[in-house]
Amino acid sequence: MRLRPAALLAVLLNAGYSLAQASVSIADFSAVGQPNKIVLNWTTGNEVNNVGFNMLRSTAQNGTYGKLNPSLIPSNSFGSVSGSDYTYNDSSAAPNQTYFYKLLAVDLNGNQENFG
């Protein structure tokens, strides 16, 4: 069962977690073109109070970025001082098009930290 961010927040608060701002460090972020998709990989160094991620894409570096994932990509290491590895497949990418990506970390309060 996948919880929506508001439901996840309620569960976490009931479990005694604090609402301190997320502390996320990104050790690596890469994009690799494959047939019919772009594979995005990232590794975190820590994920204190991070509930998940949103992946954004644009066709211009300083352009408008749109969210790719339909729901929050959940943290694999919530509250941890150690990190985790993630993969997201951008299957909507068009051939021969250059894309720019940003990763947003979302904390318990809904605050977002931008990487990219």
Image (cartoon, rainbow, N blue to C red):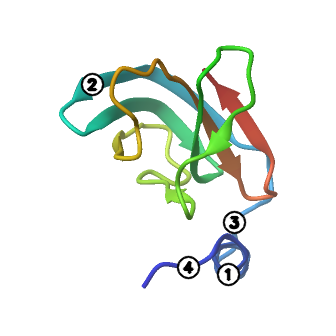
Q: Residues within 10 Å of mark 4 (few under 14, many from 20)?
A: few
Which label's residue is closer to the chain start, 4 or 3? 4
Which label's residue is closer to the chain start, 3 or 1? 1
Q: Residue at x 51, y 25 (%)?
A: 26
Which label's residue is closer to the chain start, 3 or 2? 3
Residue 103, how many percent across, how many down?
58, 34
Does the CB distance between marks 2 and 1 fall below 8 Å?
no
Secondary structure under tag 2 reads strand
From the viewer's perspective, is the residue at label 3 or at label 2 nearer?
A: 2
Q: In the drawing, what numbered circle is on residue 17?
A: 3
Secondary structure under tag 4 reads loop
From the viewer's perspective, is the residue at label 2 or at label 4 nearer?
A: 2
Which label's residue is closer to the chain start, 2 or 1? 1
Mark 2–mark 1 Cα distance, whole angstroms, equals 35 Å
Residue 77, how many percent across, how many down?
44, 51
Q: In the drawing, what numbered circle is on residue 7?
A: 1
Which label's residue is closer to the chain start, 2 or 4? 4
Direction from residue 87 to residue 67 in the image, left or right: right
Residue 2, how many percent across, how many down?
47, 78
Q: Eyeballing the image, is 33 above or below 113?
A: above
Q: Which residue is mark 2?
A: 33
